[in-house]
Amino acid sequence: MSIVHSETIPLVSEPDMVVVRRRVREVSSQVGLSLVDQTKLVTAASELARNTLIYGGGGTMQLESLNGPRTGVRLIFVDKGPGIPDVNLALRDGYTTGTGLGLGLGGSKRLVNEFEIQSKVGEGTRVAVTRWK
Amino acid sequence: MEKIPILRMGDFLLVTIQVDMHDRLAMTLQEDLTTRISETAARGVLIDISSLEIVDSFIGRMLGNIAAMSRVLDAQTVVVGMQPAVAITLVELGMSLPGVRTALNVDAGMRLLKESLNGHRAEQHVHRP
């Protein structure tokens, strides 16, 4: 697998989410994801970017387009926030420590083909998702 | 400050969302609409989301809140024009917008609002001989 393109988008304030959604849409369209798959990935990106911003206290999103043998788009969200004590609980629909609906993590997992989360209390959280063509 | 315009047409308020909404803009719209319903005694709200390329859980919740708040203020809300890809994604995300009335397009949405308004008037008539 080779990374054809990679860029890092900062996530420090709310308008950054608009940039994230726009760039994920553009790159997904460039690699040839279907309209439904583009929409799923952009929606997952929006949910995860909000998590990074609100729960992680800000961070970054790395956006990669992948090629060979499979074509796809990978997004990696990284924050140095408080971390998630119980990842399985956080993935459950309806669970939230904030004021949201608790659909962000679990919901975005359903919208992508690969979902990987690493979190350490006191150190931060890294979520990597991939949508294949 | 950036705002989404709210148009008044008779008993109804019309909103067309044409920009990628960040969270604060969505919150502002929710507050503005509630204020306008109360000011104008509007009986219906039509929200056209045909330009929206995604509806995530935040925007979904906003639509649900607007529907609930307008109901409390005696107005109906209809959300129209959702793109098929958005509908598929929204359901997979886990949101089926309970309590939000939807219609395929603006025409169908207006019809729905008018019907419910006429139905409401007929009902009032029956109850007050």
Image: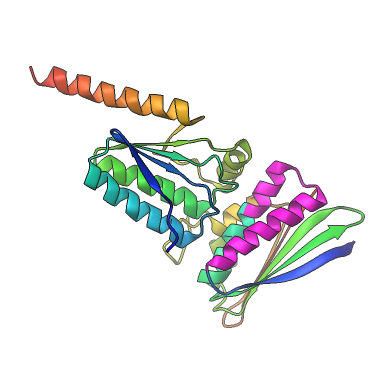
Nearest the viewer among B109 and A55 is B109
Q: Position of residue B65 (x, y in %)?
A: 37, 49
Q: Is residue A86 visible?
A: no
**Frontmost residue, B115 versus B101:** B115
Is A109 on the left or on the right of B100, as rendered?
Answer: right
Q: Which residues are magenta?
A: A14-42
Measured as percent of width and height from the top left, residue A61 is found at 67, 69
Q: How is the image coloured?
A: rainbow
Say which residue appears at 58% left-offset and 55% top-offset. A106
Image point 84% across, 59% down: which residue? Answer: A66
Determine whether B32 is above or below B14 in the image: below
Q: Residue furthest bottom?
A: A122
Q: Is residue B94 above or below residue A44?
A: above
Return the x and y of residue A35 as percentages of the image width and height. 71, 42
Q: How many marks?
A: 0
- Of the 4 image quadrants, the one containing the C terminus of chain B is top left
Residue lying furthest right in this view? A69
- Label the magenta part by its dominant secondary structure: helix
Left or right: where does residue B61 sit relative to residue B68? Answer: right
Answer whether residue B24 is visible to the viewer in this image.
Answer: yes
Which residue is pictured at 51% across the width and 52% down the height? B57
Taking the magenta stretch, the answer to whether it contains residue A35 is yes
Report the quarter where the N terminus of chain B lies.
Answer: bottom left
Say whether residue B53 is left or right of residue B99.
right
Residue B70 x %, y % = 30, 43
Q: Magenta stretch containing residue A66, yes or no? A: no
